[in-house]
């Protein structure tokens, strides 16, 4: 049993008082996150990581239910004897940074990332600033169930939340941290010699999803000589009609469609010469970034894969580089990376930016950091200096700075990775029926053989971090292809992902998706 999804615990906030076991039940059955559940999670983390003189760093974003959740988590740690450092409203990566700077024992970020503002959640970090692993999450979950059997009176939680005593200035701390990282990025990606170039007659549009970065990031960029115009400050709430969470990799619009869209950023883009970088969008908790570029007929999303490709092209050649990409990234990215003389290793990981960090940890060096982790959703995991060495973290603001230093702001510099990929979902899905093995997996493999009889060098299997994943890979003539089937980490759906590094093979891959869907949909759709 694990109450965590791909990236933490998430649910729609419900501030009504709940007994401990009720709090777990409404999360499991109704996807509702209560202060009582937040208390159980905080207390479970404290018990799981208990040690003398323990300290936890807690941050959160601007969601209406968060003050009550913060107080519940704070109370849970303090009742366990922990020291609590409250960061205030901030981006998720700042929890990572302050945790390491203060040598804290754990961190908790209270957010649901790009989910609607009515949701919230908890992301947990260990003493090394790493997001929780499944093993850690299972231990925490078991402790939460044990706590629910004890005599804890939690019915007072969720009442009027009092003032929260914040101990740091999050905007100032994040700005200073990015200043240090920009110096390191300048040596890693030296193409623009430390200048944030943007070749356009108009300012770079900036959509910060009405998150905490509004308070410091636009001014920071302008101090570096970059003209920007922030658009999400007029949004009615965090993530509402704004932000990277509303922009999907592969999306394109005509100029007319963009002007009529409900997304604030799309409404503000204007026709520009082809190849002009138009805009950058962060998600609500500030850990990822997507871009918009002008194409002939309208704006298009520049995803994490294209951003990573630009970083590798501009990377310093005085070091050997390692790239990690998730199983949903463009295969053309890894194919191109393997052909670069300064790239030493290309790795494939499970979905979730934590797995990028896990894969890259061994490759990170103290003297010349040379690693990039990427998910097409806009997560870029890059090195960050701290007192004891280097860590790995995804930060949307830092990602934008890195790609601008790598020359992506020059007109015509944006190039999509160049492969073909498509994701579909079976929803709702009886997720327990898909395990990645057994008769249903064998039926999927048979469908692959029938749909792609010409396929060669076919392999199949899973990844340790994705226990229900079936990953099929092989060759179609000179082209690589991949099919992944996995349960969603947070929703009642099973996802199918097909990829090839040669777009001309798209008809074959579409036929493959249709064949696998025909096998799985009848088996997984609830009766």
Image: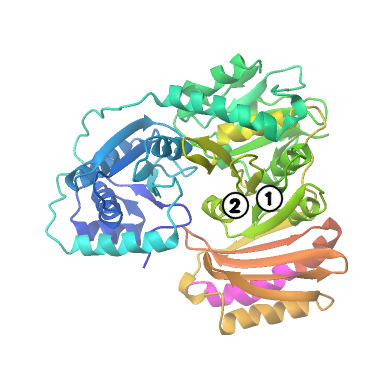
Q: Quadrant of residue 105?
A: top left
Q: Cβ–Cβ below 8 Å for labels 1 and 2?
A: yes
Q: Residue at x 75, y 49 (%)?
A: 343
Q: Position of residue 43 (x, y in %)?
A: 24, 51
Q: Nearer the viewer, residue 376 or 496?
A: 376
As drawn, 362 above or below 365 = below
Query: Which of 509 and 385 lies nearest the eye of the viewer?
Result: 385
Q: Where residue 455 appears, x then y in whole percent?
A: 81, 74
Q: Residue at left 32%, top 59%?
A: 140
- Whether residue 498 can be seen here: yes
Colour convention of the picture = rainbow
Q: Is residue 273 magenta?
A: no
- How far apart in space, not on screen, are marks 1 and 2 (Cα)? 7 Å
Residue 96 placed where, x, y %? 44, 40
Front residue of 67/358: it is 358
Q: Quadrant of residue 185?
A: top right
The reply to whether residue 235 is visible in this rendering is no
Q: Which residues are magenta?
A: 512-526
Magenta span: predominant SS is: helix
Secondary structure beneath label 2: helix
Residue ID for mark 2: 360
User: On the picture, is 24 further left or further right than 213?
Assistant: left
What residue sits right under mark 1 in the picture?
322
- Tell me: residue 336, above or below residue 141: above
Residue 522 part of the magenta segment? yes
| Percent x, y of residue 289 | 60, 37
């Amino acid at each position: 049993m694990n109450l965590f999804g791909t990236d933490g615990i998430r649910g729609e906030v419900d501030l009504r008082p709940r007994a401990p076991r009720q709090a777990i039940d409404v999360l499991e059955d109704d996807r509702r996150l209560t202060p009582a559940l937040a208390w159980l999670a905080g207390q479970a983390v404290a018990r799981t990581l208990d040690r003398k003189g323990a300290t936890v760093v807690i941050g959160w974003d601007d969601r209406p239910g968060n003050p009550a959740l913060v107080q519940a988590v704070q109370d849970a740690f303090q009742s366990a004897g922990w020291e609590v450092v409250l960061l205030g409203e901030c981006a998720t990566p700042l929890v990572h940074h302050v945790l390491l700077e203060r040598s804290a024992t754990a961190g908790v970020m209270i957010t649901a990332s790009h989910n609607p503002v009515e949701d919230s959640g908890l992301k947990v970090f260990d003493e090394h600033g790493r997001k929780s692993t499944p093993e850690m999450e299972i231990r925490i979950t078991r402790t939460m169930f044990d706590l629910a059997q004890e005599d804890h009176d939690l019915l007072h939680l969720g009442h009027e939340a009092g003032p929260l005593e914040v101990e740091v200035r999050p905007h100032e701390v994040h700005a200073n941290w990015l200043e240090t990282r920009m110096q390191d990025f300048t040596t890693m990606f030296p193409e623009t010699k430390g200048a944030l170039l943007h070749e356009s007659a108009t300012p770079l549009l900036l959509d910060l999803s009405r998150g905490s970065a509004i308070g410091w990031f636009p001014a920071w960029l302008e101090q570096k000589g970059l003209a920007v115009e922030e658009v999400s400050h007029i949004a009615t709430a965090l993530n509402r009609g704004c932000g990277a969470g509303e922009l999907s990799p592969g999306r394109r619009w005509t100029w007319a469609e963009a002007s009529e869209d409900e997304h604030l950023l799309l409404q503000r883009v204007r026709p520009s010469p082809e190849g002009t970088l138009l805009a950058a969008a962060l998600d609500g908790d500030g850990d990822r970034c997507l871009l918009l570029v002008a194409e002939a007929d309208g704006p298009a999303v520049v995803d994490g894969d294209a951003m990573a490709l630009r970083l590798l092209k501009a990377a310093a050649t005085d070091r050997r580089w390692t790239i990690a990409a998730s199983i949903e990234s463009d295969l053309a990215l890894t194919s191109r990376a393997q052909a670069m003389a300064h790239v030493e290793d290309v790795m494939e990981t499970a979905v979730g930016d934590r797995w990028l960090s896990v894969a890259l940890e061994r490759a990170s060096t103290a003297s010349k950091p040379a690693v990039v982790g990427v998910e097409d959703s806009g997560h870029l995991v890059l090195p960050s200096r701290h007192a004891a060495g280097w860590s790995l973290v995804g930060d949307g603001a830092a990602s934008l700075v890195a790609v601008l230093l790598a020359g992506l702001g020059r007109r015509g510099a944006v190039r999509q990775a160049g492969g073909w990929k498509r994701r579909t979902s079976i929803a709702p899905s009886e997720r327990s029926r898909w395990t990645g093995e057994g008769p249903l997996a064998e039926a999927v493999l048979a469908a692959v053989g029938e749909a792609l009889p010409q396929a060669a060098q076919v392999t199949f299997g899973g990844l340790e971090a994705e226990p229900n994943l079936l990953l099929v890979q092989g060759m179609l003539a000179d082209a690589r292809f991949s099919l992944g089937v996995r349960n969603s980490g947070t929703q009642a759906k099973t996802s199918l992902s097909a990829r090839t590094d040669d777009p001309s093979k798209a008809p074959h891959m579409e036929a493959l998706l249709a064949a696998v869907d025909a096998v799985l949909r009848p088996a997984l759709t609830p009766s």
